[in-house]
Image (cartoon, helix red, strand yellow):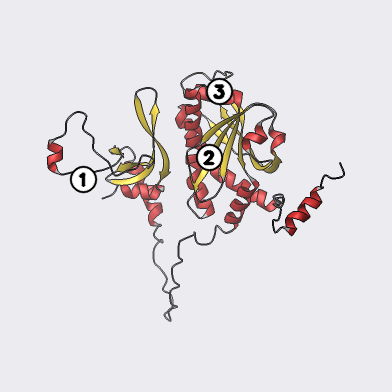
């Protein structure tokens, strides 16, 4: 066995050849863990209403304490993983982790059942769970964007199942940042709901959180105004509220008004003579590629984008992947 090189000898050979071995990742610092824990709390602030609306019954998602963990320590039972890659704002992915049994109960609730657990998840169960987790992620993205000072959006999730003993290999990271909260439906379900990111993503989030008070990337600060030699005059009366605040306050007066919502798959410009020639079986080419998002339109303005999904066996629906801020949506209702 004397001719087998030690790791130190291998490293020295790699250095001599000009190829450094990848350094070990440093552990997350206490400050980084605390920063990402605060972001996790912000992220889950709107999750309760999103899950409750989907289930049409009281439900809650609570955030937990943040900590750096070894993934193998979480590998005590079967799990279902919902992996959300970042579409913008950050690199990497966020993972939601549910125990398999409770995931099957949640799927049954979403599909109109009473929360019965089962051993295997079928396609309908997985679609229902993806929709629920997408709602949770979608509710958290605007809050996370505000906290980080940049737009954060998620791509559609990938669902993975991991039997006991497989979690580290299925997840792909030996270490992680963990926020261990709870997903609960009173009288039916009360289960750990885990939010995981890799150490690299956690470090990036913590760095952006510290810099969040500065200007957002790509956004220029307004030039400083020249100092005036005139003394400032006292302002009489109360200061006007910011426009965005006024919009959000006044929107309560018109929330029951119905508006027409249109999902736009694409458009095309054709001569009138082609319209006259249309017959059953005719094909009109649209201006969108097959993988381009479809648009949600209100008052002839695009307020969100998403992808078409099948609900049940005979209906289409739109899964939102990008959406305007609440203030922009309010302005859309105006002239």
The answer to whether the residues at label 2 and label 1 have Cβ atoms under 8 Å apart is no
Q: Which mark's residue is nearer the viewer, 1 or 3?
A: 1
Residue at 67% x, 35% y: name it.
Answer: 168
- Relative to residue 82, is residue 27 depicted above or below? below
Asked whether residue 140 appears in the rendered view, the answer is: yes
Mark with earlier residue (3, 2): 2
Q: Is residue 244 rendered to the left or right of residue 167?
A: left
Mark with earlier residue (1, 3): 3
Q: Name the residue under label 3.
A: 104
Asked whether residue 250 appears in the rendered view, the answer is: no
Q: Name the residue under label 2.
A: 84
Picture quadrant of residue 321: top left
Q: Is residue 101 rendered to the left or right of residue 313?
A: right
User: Picture coordinates of residue 164 (x, y %)?
Assistant: 68, 27
Picture quadrant of residue 265: top left
Mark with earlier residue (2, 1): 2
Residue at 13% x, 42% y: name it.
Answer: 272
- Residue lying furthest front in this view? 3
The answer to whether the residues at label 1 and label 3 have Cβ atoms under 8 Å apart is no
Residue nearer the viewer, 334 or 164: 164
User: Picture coordinates of residue 207 (x, y %)?
Assistant: 61, 56
Q: Between marks 1 and 3, how big is the CA–CA gap? A: 48 Å
Mark 2 Cα shell of 10 Å, populated few (<14), some (14-19), many (≥20): many
Residue at 56% x, 22% y: name it.
Answer: 188
Q: Which mark's residue is nearer the viewer, 2 or 1?
A: 1
Q: Name the residue under label 1.
A: 269
Q: Between marks 2 and 1, how big is the CA–CA gap? A: 37 Å
């Amino acid at each position: 066995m004397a001719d087998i090189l030690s790791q130190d000898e291998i490293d020295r050979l790699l250095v001599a050849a000009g190829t450094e071995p990848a350094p070990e990742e440093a552990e997350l610092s206490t400050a980084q863990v605390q920063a990402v824990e605060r972001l996790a709390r912000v992220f889950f602030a709107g999750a309760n209403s999103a899950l409750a609306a989907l289930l049409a019954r009281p439900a809650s998602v609570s955030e937990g304490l943040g900590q750096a963990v070894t993934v193998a320590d979480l590998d005590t039972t079967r799990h279902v993983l919902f992996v959300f890659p970042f579409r913008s704002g950050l690199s990497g992915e966020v993972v939601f982790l549910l125990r398999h049994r409770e995931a099957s109960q949640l799927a049954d609730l979403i599909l109109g059942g009473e929360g019965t657990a089962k051993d295997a998840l079928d396609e309908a169960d997985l679609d229902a769970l993806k929709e629920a987790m997408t709602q949770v992620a979608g509710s958290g993205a605007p809050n996370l964007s505000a906290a980080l000072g940049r737009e954060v959006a998620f791509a559609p999730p990938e669902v993975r199942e991991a039997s006991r003993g497989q979690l580290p290999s299925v997840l792909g990271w030996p270490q992680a940042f963990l926020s261990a909260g709870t997903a609960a439906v009173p009288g039916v379900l009360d289960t750990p709901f885990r939010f995981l990111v890799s150490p690299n993503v956690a470090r990036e989030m913590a760095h952006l959180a510290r810099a969040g008070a500065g200007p957002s990337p790509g956004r220029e600060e307004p030039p400083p105004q020249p100092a005036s030699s005139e003394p400032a005059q006292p302002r009489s009366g109360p200061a006007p509220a910011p426009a965005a605040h006024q919009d959000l306050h006044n929107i309560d007066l018109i929330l029951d008004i119905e508006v027409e919502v249109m999902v736009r798959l694409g458009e095309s410009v054709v001569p009138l003579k082609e319209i006259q020639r249309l017959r059953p079986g005719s094909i009109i080419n649209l201006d969108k590629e097959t993988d381009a998002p479809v648009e949600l339109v209100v008052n002839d303005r695009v307020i969100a984008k998403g992808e078409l999904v099948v609900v049940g066996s005979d209906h289409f629906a739109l899964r939102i992947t990008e959406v305007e801020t609440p203030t922009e949506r309010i302005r859309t209702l105006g002239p």
